[in-house]
C-alpha cells in the first residue's frame, strides 16, 4: 500500500529526533498468539467473546458492554482467556523497524505484551514499565511504557474493558491522562491502530484539559480513511497518515533515519548576531493581546505564550523547513505573514543558529555567511524583495536554510531574478474554515461580536487573518479610529499631524525615519533637538523606536508601530494634508539624508501616493515635473504617466510614457508594458474612426506580446495581456479577439505551473476560460 503522510518531512524529523508512540488494537494485528492466531482488533474480540462465552443473544452489545456482563459473572474465566489470547508468541519482523525510531514514550490501550517482545533483543534501548518503576528521568536508553488499560504482564492487575471502567478511566486515575497530555505537549506523537473512540483519551486530548497549551505535532495512521475520517481527525488537530500498519512499518524501516550530523553550534547566536537573535522569553515587555487585535504588530511575548493561533500555513512551511528547503512566503497586506514568521522562528526545532532579520542588504548577507563559518543557520528574512540579491547569497550557501517573507506584489516585480527551481513558494493570504474559527475564538470577548460576521470577499476568495479580526470586533475599525485621530491632531497640532503622516509615508517606502530626516522636515516649526523629541513623545502610541537593519549608533530612528497602522493613516489622511506633507518633505529633505535612498525612490513617487495627495491632475503633473528636475529618471516619468492615466488624462499620459520609452531606448520591458497599457486605455473607450481605434489596440497587444517573449518577467506581462484580452473580446467578440484569449489562456496556464502563488494569474485564467467556453 502506498503510504501518504501529511507534512512528511516534519514527520521524518520527529522520527529521527524523538517522538511518542500511541498504539491501539490495530497496531498489534501482525502478531500471533500461541495458537498461531493474529491478535484481534476490538470487533474481532467482540465476536470471539460471544462465541467463547455463549452469548448468542447479545450480538447487539458493544465490546465494553460484553466485558461488563462477562466480568460480573465469570471474571476469572474472562481474564484467563484474555491473558492467553494476548500473549504474543511470534510477530512480523516489520515490527523491529520501530527500534530505529527515537521513541521517548509508548502509550497503549492494548493489554498484550507485544512491545516487551519487540524490545527484548534491542541493542539500542529498553522498555521502562512506568507502572512498576516510575519515570526513567535521565536514562537516555529507556523508553517510558504506559499501559493505559492494564497489561497481561502485570500479575493481578485489572484489565480495562468494561464500559464503566473505560468511562471512569479519566476520573479514576486522572494523573495518568495528565501525563499523556504533558508528553504530547513536549514531543510529537504518532497514533497507530487507534480510533480514538476511548472517552478517556478524548478527554486527555481536549484543549480544555490542556488549559490552552499547544500540542506538538500529532499524526494518526488511518487505513483507507473516508473524507469524513480525514475531516474529523483534522478537526482534532491530527495530521493524517494514510496507511495500514504493515505498510507504515515498512515505510519507517526504509525512510526513518537518524539525522545527518551537522557541524555543532559552538558559539552563542546572541554573541555572533546580537541584532538578529531571538530574544529570551521574559526579556521583552508583555502587553495585552487586545493590542494585536486592534492592529499592532505581534510581539515576541505574544508568540512565546502561543496566544495567537497558528493557521494551517504553519505546518506547511514548517514541513519545508524540516526538508531544509529554501522557501519564499508570500501574501497580501495584513494576512499575518510577520506573525507566521515569528511563530516559525520560535517554534521550529533546529540544531544551529536561528536568526530573524527585517530586510538584508547583499553586503550584510555576505557578512552573515562569513560569520557563520561552517556552522548551520536557519534565517528568516522579512521584506526580502527589496534586496533580492541577499536572498540569492543566502540560499546558495549549503549551510543555510532561508525562509523569506514579503507581499506578493513586491515579489512579482523581482521574481524573475530567482531560480524558482531551487525554492518553494508558498502563498499564505487565505485562511481555511478551521483557521477562521480559531481566529474568531481568539479575539478577546471584550471586543468580539456575539456571532461570526464573514468579511465581504470576492467570489471564491477566503479572508485573511486581519480581515476576519476587523470584521468581528466591536471597536471602531482601524481606518475609522485613525480618521478621528488625524482630525483631532490636525486641528490642535498640525506639525505633529504632519510628522506622523511623514513617518507613515517614509515607512511605506520601506525605510525608517532618522533623526536627521525628521529634523530637516520639521526645521520650519521647531528650533532644536529637544523640541523634536517632545514631538515624538506626543506620538509614542503610534511611532516607536526603530532598531533594524538601517539603524546606526549615531542617531535615533523611528517607525510607525505597525504596517497596518501606517497604511490606515495614509488611507485616512485628507488629500490636502497629504499633499502638504509630500511637497514639504521633498522640498526640505535631501536624498543625502534618506537611508537606503535606492529603496526609498522605488516607491516614493508611486502613482498611488500622488493620486491620494493631488486631486487636481494639473497639480499632480506639476509635482512630477518638479521632481524630474532632481531625478531625471525614465521610471519617474513612468509613474507620472500612470498617475495621469488614472486621472483619465490619456493624451498627457501617453506623451509622458512615450518620452520614458524613448529615454530608456525601448530597452526596459516594464516601461514598455506601461506604454502598452496606456495606449490601450487611451483608445479602448474612444469612438471608432476608420479602424484607427482597433489598430491602436492591436499595437498595444503586439507590444505586450513582444515584452512577454523577450523579458524574463513573463508573469508580469502575461497578466497585463490577459486583462486587455478580456476587454478586447468584450468589445469585439470575433475571431481575432478569440485568438488573443487563446494566447492568454496558454500563457496563464504556463505561468500557473511555475507561479501558483500568483492569485492574479489564477483569477484571470478563470475569466479567460469562461469567455472561451
Image (cartoon, rainbow, N blue to C red):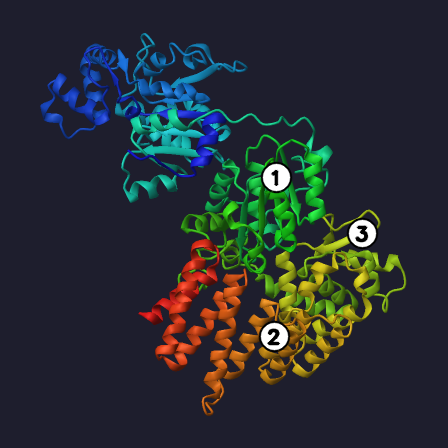
**Residue at position x 62%, y 27% in the image:** 263
- Please provide percent x and percent y for residue 288: 62, 46
Earlier sequence position, callout 2 versus callout 3: 3
Query: Residue 642, which numbered label?
Result: 2
Whether 144 is drawn above or below 254: the answer is above
Query: Front-most of 75 and 712?
Result: 712
Query: Front-most of 366 and 698?
Result: 698
Task: Select label 2 or label 1 by which is in front.
Answer: 1
**Residue at position x 22%, y 19% in the image:** 38
- Please provide percent x and percent y for residue 295: 60, 55
**Label 1: few (<14), some (14–19) or many (≥20) C-alpha neighbours in 10 Å:** few
Whether residue 383 is visible here, answered yes or no, is: no
- Please provide percent x and percent y for residue 293: 57, 52
For disc 1, the marked residue is 397
Earlier sequence position, callout 2 versus callout 1: 1
Q: Marks 2 and 1, Cα distance to the nearest angstrom?
A: 40 Å
Whether residue 23 is visible here, answered yes or no, is: yes
Whether 43 is drawn above or below 154: the answer is below
Q: Position of 132 compared to 268: left or right?
A: left
The single residue placed furthest to the right in the displayed view is: 527
Earlier sequence position, callout 1 versus callout 3: 1
Amino acid at each position: 500500500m502506498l503510504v501518504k503522510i501529511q507534512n512528511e518531512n516534519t514527520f521524518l524529523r520527529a522520527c529521527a529526533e524523538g517522538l511518542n508512540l500511541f498504539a491501539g488494537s490495530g497496531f498489534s494485528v501482525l502478531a500471533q498468539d500461541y495458537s498461531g492466531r493474529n491478535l484481534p482488533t476490538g470487533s474481532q474480540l467482540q465476536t470471539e467473546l460471544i462465541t467463547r462465552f455463549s452469548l448468542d443473544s447479545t450480538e447487539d452489545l458493544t465490546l465494553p458492554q460484553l466485558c461488563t456482563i462477562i466480568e460480573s459473572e465469570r471474571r476469572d474465566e474472562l481474564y484467563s482467556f484474555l491473558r492467553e489470547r494476548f500473549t504474543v508468541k511470534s510477530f512480523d519482523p516489520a515490527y523491529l523497524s520501530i527500534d530505529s525510531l527515537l521513541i521517548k514514550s509508548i502509550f497503549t490501550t492494548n493489554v498484550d505484551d507485544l512491545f516487551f517482545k519487540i524490545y527484548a533483543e534491542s541493542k539500542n534501548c529498553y522498555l521502562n514499565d512506568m507502572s512498576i518503576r516510575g519515570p526513567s528521568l535521565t536514562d537516555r536508553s529507556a523508553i517510558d511504557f504506559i499501559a493505559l488499560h492494564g497489561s497481561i504482564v502485570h500479575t493481578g492487575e485489572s484489565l480495562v474493558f468494561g464500559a464503566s471502567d473505560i468511562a471512569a478511566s479519566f476520573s479514576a486515575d486522572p494523573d495518568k491522562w495528565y501525563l499523556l497530555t504533558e508528553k504530547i505537549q513536549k514531543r510529537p506523537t504518532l497514533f497507530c491502530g487507534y480510533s480514538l473512540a476511548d472517552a478517556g483519551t478524548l478527554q486527555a486530548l481536549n484543549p480544555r484539559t490542556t488549559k490552552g497549551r499547544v500540542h506538538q505535532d500529532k499524526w494518526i495512521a488511518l487505513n483507507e480513511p473516508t473524507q469524513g475520517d480525514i475531516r474529523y481527525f483534522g478537526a482534532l488537530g491530527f495530521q493524517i497518515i494514510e496507511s495500514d500498519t504493515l505498510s507504515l512499518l515498512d515505510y519507517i524501516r526504509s525512510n526513518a533515519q537518524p539525522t545527518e550530523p551537522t557541524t555543532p553550534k559552538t558559539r552563542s547566536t546572541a554573541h555572533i548576531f546580537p541584532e538578529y537573535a531571538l530574544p529570551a522569553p521574559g526579556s521583552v515587555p508583555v502587553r495585552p493581546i487586545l493590542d494585536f487585535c486592534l492592529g499592532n504588530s505581534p510581539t515576541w511575548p505574544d508568540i512565546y505564550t502561543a496566544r495567537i493561533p497558528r493557521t494551517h500555513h504553519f505546518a506547511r512551511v514548517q514541513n519545508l523547513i524540516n526538508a531544509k528547503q529554501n522557501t519564499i512566503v508570500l501574501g497580501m497586506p495584513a494576512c499575518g505573514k510577520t506573525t507566521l514568521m515569528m511563530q516559525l522562528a520560535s517554534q521550529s526545532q533546529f540544531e544551529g543558529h536561528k536568526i530573524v532579520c527585517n530586510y538584508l542588504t547583499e553586503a550584510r548577507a555576505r557578512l552573515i555567511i562569513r560569520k557563520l563559518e561552517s556552522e548551520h543557520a536557519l534565517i528568516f528574512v522579512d521584506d526580502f524583495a527589496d534586496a533580492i540579491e541577499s536572498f540569492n547569497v543566502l540560499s546558495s550557501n549549503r549551510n543555510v536554510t532561508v525562509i523569506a517573507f514579503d507581499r506578493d506584489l513586491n515579489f512579482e516585480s523581482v521574481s524573475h531574478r530567482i531560480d524558482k527551481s531551487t525554492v518553494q513558494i508558498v502563498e499564505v493570504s487565505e485562511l481555511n474554515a478551521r483557521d477562521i474559527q480559531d481566529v474568531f475564538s481568539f479575539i478577546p470577548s471584550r471586543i468580539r461580536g456575539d456571532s461570526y460576521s464573514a468579511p465581504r470577499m470576492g467570489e471564491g476568495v477566503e479572508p485573511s487573518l486581519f480581515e476576519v479580526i476587523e470584521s468581528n470586533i466591536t471597536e471602531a475599525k482601524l481606518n475609522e479610529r485613525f480618521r478621528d485621530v488625524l482630525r483631532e491632531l490636525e486641528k490642535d497640532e498640525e506639525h505633529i499631524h504632519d510628522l506622523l503622516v511623514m513617518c507613515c509615508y517614509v515607512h511605506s517606502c520601506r525605510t525608517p525615519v532618522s533623526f536627521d530626516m525628521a529634523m530637516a522636515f520639521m526645521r520650519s516649526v521647531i528650533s532644536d533637538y529637544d523640541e523634536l523629541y517632545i514631538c515624538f513623545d506626543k506620538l509614542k502610541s503610534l511611532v516607536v523606536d526603530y532598531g533594524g537593519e538601517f539603524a546606526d549608533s549615531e542617531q535615533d530612528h523611528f517607525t510607525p508601530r505597525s504596517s497596518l497602522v501606517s497604511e490606515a493613516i495614509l488611507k485616512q489622511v485628507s488629500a490636502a494634508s497629504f499633499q502638504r506633507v509630500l511637497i514639504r518633505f521633498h522640498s526640505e529633505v535631501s536624498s543625502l539624508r534618506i537611508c537606503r535612498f535606492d529603496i526609498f525612490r522605488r516607491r516614493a513617487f508611486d502613482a498611488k501616493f500622488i493620486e491620494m495627495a493631488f486631486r487636481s491632475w494639473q497639480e499632480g503633473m506639476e509635482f512630477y515635473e518638479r521632481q524630474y528636475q532632481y531625478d531625471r529618471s525614465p521610471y519617474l516619468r513612468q509613474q507620472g504617466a500612470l498617475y495621469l492615466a488614472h486621472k483619465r488624462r490619456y493624451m498627457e499620459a501617453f506623451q509622458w510614457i512615450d518620452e520614458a520609452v524613448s529615454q530608456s531606448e525601448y530597452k526596459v520591458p516594464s516601461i514598455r508594458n506601461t506604454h502598452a497599457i496606456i495606449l490601450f486605455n487611451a483608445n479602448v473607450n474612444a469612438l471608432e474612426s476608420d479602424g484607427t481605434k482597433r489598430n491602436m489596440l492591436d499595437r498595444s497587444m503586439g507590444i505586450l506580446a513582444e515584452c512577454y517573449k523577450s523579458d524574463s518577467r513573463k508573469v508580469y506581462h502575461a497578466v497585463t495581456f490577459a486583462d486587455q484580452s478580456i476587454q478586447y473580446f468584450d468589445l469585439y467578440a470575433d475571431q481575432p479577439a478569440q485568438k488573443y484569449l487563446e494566447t492568454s489562456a496558454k500563457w496563464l496556464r504556463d505561468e500557473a505551473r511555475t507561479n501558483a502563488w500568483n492569485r492574479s494569474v489564477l483569477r484571470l485564467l478563470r475569466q479567460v476560460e469562461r469567455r472561451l467556453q
